[in-house]
Each structure stands twice: as structure tokens, then as C-alpha cells.
Amino acid sequence: MKKYDYLIVGAGLYGATFAYEMSKKGKKCLVIDRRNHIGGNIYCEKINDINVHKYGAHIFHTSDKEIWEYVNQFVEFNNYINSPIANYKGEIYNLPFNMNTFSKLWGVITPKQAQEKIEEQKAMFNIKEPKNLEEQAISLVGQDIYLKLVKEYTEKQWGRDCKDLPAFIIKRLPVRFTYDNNYFNDRYQGIPIGGYNVIIEKMLAKADVELGVDYLKNKEKYNKLADKIVYTGMMDEYFDYKYGNLEWRSLKFENEIYEDIDNYQGNAVVNYTSHDEKFTRIIEHKHFEFNSCKGTIITKEYPMNWKLGDEAYYPVNDEKNNALFAQYKELADKEKNVIFGGRLGNYKYYDMDKVIRAALDKIKAIKL
């Protein structure tokens, strides 16, 4: 008899959801994580009474009513609406592209005027089959929006010229002909009051948790403890990079603490869309929770080239990497009693609601 029914590798949202549901069903779960904290990338670090999103801004949004009710059983959400702004060389524009953006850019007032301006710019280039990201973006929104709000931001994000990036990265660009600064179209949106840690702590309340543990370096020991394994780490790493490594983009975060400034930028998220700044955005955390405490904390976010050992944030889902992942997926499908899940385990960028949904769907499919 093994001590646990499930060993869950990774204390992020997928692993925590799995542990919570299986604990409810009377299963014993051990959750381990390399990091010294639970929550994965949604972990919040409390500094000077401000919940700092340690691994970048996370705003919960969904149109899935079931998932919204699911997360609300753990914590109450506030009414935060994500309305980022863009700073291009000192000029401020609303995101996503909407009538406020177009009015600032061209002086237009009506949706018809804005549509005509975009169509006029698209017609100048007459791009029928975009060969790269630059052509794709211009074919969608014209040159002015592309140059000020897309080009340099995207080049910083991916570390390559837009002419060298594949068109599929931007399948569409959100364009709204209304004066609406709400970034998401989803029905439900907000930030958990008290931070995301509240959710994860409640999810893991009935599981055993060990932190600062590297599963792959102690595989033999931990495999002996449980009948089944849920693995939410990188799939290529699990197989010791047998076919080579999958590519990612990474991020570096720099925090600045201000005790004499209560409001640094007037908004939770400001994107910097020119090459004048090396960072892509500044996050001012207190605005997520309408926090009126003294002082403030900002985080500058710098995209980075990824190498083995770095934190992996964004999968490079191009043709080459997707083909490589398919090879690893074949190996994974042959692994007995191992479930691969989450962003790292599926080499896929997930919003938080989709992570929870994927975990719940996986659990439904398991015959207990």
C-alpha cells in the first residue's frame, strides 16, 4: 500500500484544483513544488500591505459561469475592470483599440469615421496574403496603430523584428468601435479580495504540501509514495530533453518601492510600446485592489530570451516547436499512471479559467 493516491507535482492552479477535487472524493494527495511557495505564477507576495503579483499581472476573467461560481466558493472577488493604457513616447492611448484610441490618434468622433480611416490605411498597402507579423497587423488595423501600438511592443515581447515573426502570432487584433476601455469581453471579471493565495490555500487545505522540492531529482523517492502522478512541470524536462528542448520566452521583474508616492501612474497596468524603454509594461499593484494605503509598489516587466533553468512564461508555439511537442506528447501518452497538465505540461498558454476547466474536465474523465 502506498501512502498517497496522488502525487501532484506543482502547486499552481491546475495542481491545486486537482488536489481540492480529489481530497473531496476522499483521496489522499501530496502536493510538491520546486518553489518555496504555493500558487505557481498567481502567487502574491505581501509587501507594505500591498499584494504584489510576483510573476506579473493576473486578472481573473471568464465567460464560463460554472467556473466563476467555482472560484467564488473560495473567495469574494472585487469589481476590478482591466483597462490598461499604452504610453508611446509620452502619448497616452486606451487599450484595447477603441473609439477613445481612434479619437486621440486621428481626431475622429464617430465609428464611421474611424472605420473609414482604418480601411483607407489598409487599402494603401493592399495586403492579400500576409507573409509576416508586420503585414498581418497592417492588414488588420492599418499603419498608424501598427507603428505606435503594435510594432515595437511586439518586438520587445518576442525579441525579433516584426518582419521576422510569423503572421499567425497575431491572428486578430481587438478593434472596438465603441468608447469602451474594458480590455476583456468576458461576462465575469475581478481580483480576489486578499489576493490569489487565499484561493490556493483553501484548495490545498486537505492535502499534504512540501515546498522547495525538485521532483525530477528525487523521482524514485516520490514515485514510491503514490499510486498516480499529476505532473504540471515542463514535459520535455520530464523526459530529460530526449528530443531537444521546447522554446519559451521568459520575463524579468524589477520592483520599486515608493514610501513617499501614493499613486505612481494612476492605473494598474501601463504598456510601454516604444523601444525607448526596455520594459514592456509597468504594473502598480495597489490599483488591483483599490488599496488606499500609504506608499506604492511598481513592477517593471522585461521580456527575456529563455535558456534552460530560466522561468518559462510564454511557449513559442511555432511550427517547429509544436512538432517537437507532438513527439513528447507521444511519449507522455505511453506513461502509465501519469497525468500531464497545466501550462508547462501542455506547452500551451492558458488563462486562469481555462486551467481550472482543464483540471475539472480531466477529473471527470478519471474512473475512480
Image (tube, rainbow, N blue to C red):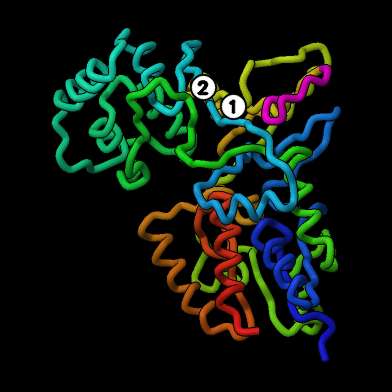
Q: CA distance from mark 2 to mark 1?
A: 7 Å
Task: Write the residue at 45% across / 38% down.
Answer: 185
Q: Earlier in the sequence, mark 2 or mark 1?
A: 2
Q: Which mark is residue 269?
A: 1
Amino acid at pointer 1:
Val
Range of the magenta residues?
A: 287-294
Question: 50 left or right of 327?
Answer: right
Where residue 266 sits in the image (x, y, percent)? 63, 16
Task: Determine whether the residue tagged by mark 1 lies in a helix, strand or loop.
Answer: strand
Q: Could you say which disc has been placed on residue 259 in the image?
A: none
- Cβ atoms under marks 2 and 1 closer than 8 Å: yes
Q: Residues within 10 Å of mark 1 (few under 14, many from 20)?
A: many
The answer to whether residue 220 is seen in the rendering is no
Q: Position of residue 153 (x, y in %)?
A: 45, 29
Local secondary structure at mark 2: strand
Image spot of residue 69 (x, y percent): 63, 52
Residue at the disc numbered 2: 85
Mark yes or no: residue 169 visible.
Answer: yes
Amino acid type, residue under disc 2 in the picture: Ile
